[in-house]
Image: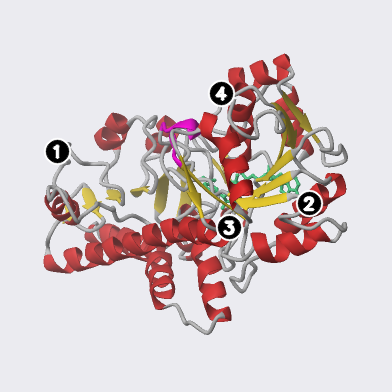
């Protein structure tokens, strides 16, 4: 057994969402007794009934772990004192003015503090700015009289899970940075059996910044390729062909793809955590602001493509029927947080279009409620069946999220006019004037 295993047989995971639930089940499968703590009664009830609400976690996995007693979902009124290590996996949203909102970390910290004893280990996993673990979280946990590093271990280990891509959490390498080397090794010893590799960093701050940099890197590169798409539209070139061409270079290039905007709980939000921390140390971050600006304008561009497409048919957007395909923020997940579908649908509705949508994974969609960032309104809708949506002969179909389980043959067969923001028409031969592609023009 590795160092720390014997001491950390029982582990608490606080926050059982996209990050915490797979972690809890991986730890349970590795032989730990896991206390899964969540504030949502609904989620606890579903887990207790052996039901998963996370795309990549099967009901069977939950039921087996709950049935075996290796995973015990409980509310925060149950103390975690029977465990010696706690992993915090709660959300890290931003405020209306796009500043970090550490409210969930603080409330999870309060819970952890209640059961904290000498010898325990606390590991933060929520994505956050460098200094959170050693600053606000440490201060909160030390309020009970114990000192981090001396009386209890404190570390940060980011999560890199990417739902919907068929990559199990146990296949993704991890980072960990503790308050001291012994703490880093102890946290790494817990994570090693559930990861292909664990890289030990010299501090929690370095691990926090590494995670933020990964997400900022993605956001900035998506913005770059979104700009390239807009340039290609003006040059009469196909951005998808250009990216595929560039991707043949075996070094120094990695492809990113344009789209209707960025979504999810991470990419649109996390960069503000770095920008805010940079401002605190007197540095004005320009890339993050520019990337956020470009990506957040893509939904408007999609609406302008719909207008152009309708215009070709002599139709106005006002009064046109528009069927949106896919409202999840990315393919093959049922997560609509900050989905670009929200500003697209809200904008189409505000322009007087009659909007319906089809998403096999999301039976209802409330554009305003799905968005953490302010300024998105729109009327809530219920998903129509694909056949029903196509039978209504919409004036335009907009492909926002290309889930694999949408019947694309039916879409391209039956839709008269399509705005394709995801290159879903690749490999097909659309009818002349049928498909207007983002970054490429008419097929
Ligand atoms: N979703 C991803 O793909 C992903 C990937 C990497 C990192 N992250 C980061 O991981 C963190 C968690 O994200 P997520 O997507 O799992 O969030 P989530 O919303 O899916 O899950 C968070 C869970 O925490 C619970 N919760 C909130 N406050 C709580 C509290 N005080 N006590 C107990 N439970 C509480 C909620 O009920 C919810 O079930 C965030 O910082 C996020 O940026 C997410």
Label for residue 204? Answer: 3
Residue 64 is left or right of residue 367, and the answer is right
Q: Is residue 254 visible?
A: yes
Label 4 vs label 3: CA separation?
Answer: 32 Å
Q: CA distance from mark 3 to mark 2?
A: 17 Å
Q: Which residue is mark 4?
A: 58
Q: Position of residue 433 (x, y in %)?
A: 17, 50
Query: In whole angstroms, how far apart are the C-alphas of marks 1 and 3?
Result: 52 Å
At horizontal 53% and vertical 30% (from top left) the residue drawn is 194
Q: What is the x, y in percent for residue 257? A: 28, 53
Q: Earlier in the sequence, mark 2 or mark 4?
A: 4
Q: Nearer the viewer, mark 3 or mark 2?
A: 2
Disc 3, SS: helix
**Ligand 1 under 8 Å from disc 4 Cβ:** no
Could you tell me how far apart the alpha carbons at marks 2 and 4 are, in whole angstroms? 39 Å
The residue identified by callout 2 is: 151
Residue at the spot of label 1: 429
**Disc 1 C-beta below 8 A from ligand 1:** no
Q: Give the residues drawn in magenta, as a range.
A: 166-173
Q: Is residue 316 visible?
A: no
Residue sitting at x 34%, y 29%:
407
Q: Are marks 1 and 3 in contact (CB under 8 Å)?
A: no
Q: Nearer the viewer, mark 1 or mark 3?
A: 3
Q: In what element is the residue under mark 1?
A: loop
Q: Do tag 2 and tag 4 residues touch (Cβ < 8 Å)? A: no
Front tag of 1 and 2: 2
Q: Compare marks 1 and 3 and give the one earlier in the sequence.
A: 3
**Which quadrant of the structure image shows residue 137?**
bottom right
């Amino acid at each position: 057994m590795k160092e720390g295993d014997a001491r950390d047989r029982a582990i608490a995971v606080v926050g059982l969402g996209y990050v915490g639930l797979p972690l809890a089940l991986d730890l349970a499968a590795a032989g730990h007794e896991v206390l899964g703590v969540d504030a949502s009664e609904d989620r606890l009830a579903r887990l207790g009934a052996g039901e998963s609400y996370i795309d990549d976690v099967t009901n069977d996995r939950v039921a087996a772990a709950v049935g075996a007693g290796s995973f015990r979902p409980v509310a925060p009124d149950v103390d975690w004192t029977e465990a010696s290590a706690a992993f915090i996996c709660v959300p890290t949203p931003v405020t209306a003015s796009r500043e970090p909102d550490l409210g969930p970390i603080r409330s999870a910290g309060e819970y952890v503090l209640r059961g904290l004893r000498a010898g325990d280990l606390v590991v933060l996993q929520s994505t956050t700015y460098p200094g959170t673990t050693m600053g606000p979280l440490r201060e909160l946990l030390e309020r009970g009289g114990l000192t981090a590093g001396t009386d209890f271990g404190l570390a940060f280990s980011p999560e890199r899970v990417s739902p919907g891509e068929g990559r199990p959490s146990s296949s993704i390498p991890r980072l960990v940075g503790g308050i001291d080397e012994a703490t880093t090794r102890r946290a790494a010893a817990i994570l090693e059996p559930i990861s292909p590799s664990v890289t030990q960093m010299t501090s929690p701050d370095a691990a926090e910044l590494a995670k933020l940099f990964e997400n900022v890197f993605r956001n900035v590169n998506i913005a770059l390729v979104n700009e390239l798409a807009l340039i290609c539209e003006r040059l009469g070139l196909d951005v998808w062909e250009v990216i595929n061409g560039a991707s043949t270079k075996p070094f120094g290039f990695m492809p990113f793809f344009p789209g209707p905007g960025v979504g999810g709980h991470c990419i649109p939000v996390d960069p503000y955590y770095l920008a805010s921390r940079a401002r605190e140390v007197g540095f004005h971050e320009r890339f993050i602001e520019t990337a956020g600006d470009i990506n957040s304008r893509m939904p408007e561009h999609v609406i302008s493509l719909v207008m152009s497409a309708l215009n070709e048919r002599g139709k106005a957007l006002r009064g046109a029927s528009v069927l949106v395909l896919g409202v999840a923020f990315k393919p093959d997940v049922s997560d609509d947080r900050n989905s670009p579908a929200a500003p697209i649908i809200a904008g189409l509705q505000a322009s007087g279009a009659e909007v319906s949508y089809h998403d096999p994974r999301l039976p209802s969609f409330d554009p305003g409620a799905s968005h953490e960032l302010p300024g998105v309104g729109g009327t809530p809708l219920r998903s129509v069946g694909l056949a029903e949506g196509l039978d209504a002969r919409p004036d335009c179909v907009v492909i926002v999220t290309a889930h694999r389980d949408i019947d694309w043959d039916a879409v391209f067969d039956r839709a008269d006019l399509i705005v394709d923001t995801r290159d879903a028409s690749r490999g097909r031969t659309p009818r002349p004037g049928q498909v207007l592609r983002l970054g490429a023009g008419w097929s």
